[in-house]
Amino acid sequence: MELVNTHIELIIIYAGRNTLFATFLIRSYMVNLSEELFDSAKMNGANTFQTFFYLLPNRYHGLFF
């Protein structure tokens, strides 16, 4: 499969690079969140994925928009 000088090649490269950078940014910010936010989410019945997806947009609205 020849990917040299194609749009698919650029999409794969940019997606891979940006995914690594975004993961690093989100992880570094999530480490700095206070434990009270996670404790209150668990008391309300949220699992790990719900906690991540409910807390992330509230704290990092500027990261996505």
Image (tube, rainbow, N blue to C red):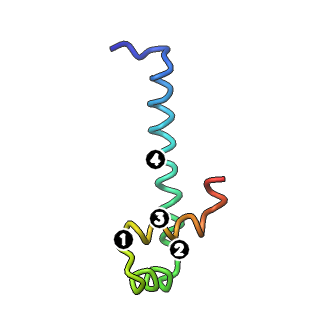
> Which mark lies nearer to you, 1 or 2?
1
Q: Residue at x 43, y 72 (%)?
A: 51
* Image depth: mark 1 or mark 4 in front: 1
The first of marks 3 and 2 along the sequence is 2
Tag 3: amino acid: Phe
Determine whether label 1 and label 2 are within 8 Å by CB: no
In percent of width and height, residue 60 lies at: 60, 64
Q: Earlier in the sequence, mark 1 or mark 4?
A: 4
Please determine whether, in this image, residue 29 is positioned above or below residue 9.
Answer: below
Q: Amino acid at mark 2?
A: Asn
- Secondary structure type for disc 2: loop
Q: Which residue is mark 1?
A: 48
Q: Which mark is residue 32?
A: 2
Residue at x 61% of width, y 54% of height:
64
Total marks placed: 4
Tag 3 and tag 2, C-beta contact below 8 Å = no
Q: Is residue 13 above or below residue 51?
A: above
Front in this rendered view, residue 26 or 50 = 50
Instruction: Find disc 4 in the rendering and name its residue.
Output: 20
Q: Amino acid at mark 1?
A: Thr
Helix, strand or loop for disc 1 = helix
Give the mark nearer the N terminus: 2 vs 4: 4
Q: Are marks 2 and 4 in contact (CB under 8 Å)?
A: no
Residue designated by label 3: 53
Residue 21 in picture, x, y percent from top left = 51, 49
Mark seen at residue 30: none
3 and 1 marks in contact (CB < 8 Å): no
- Residue appearing at x 44%, y 14% in the figure: 4
Residue that protrudes farthest toward the left in the picture: 1
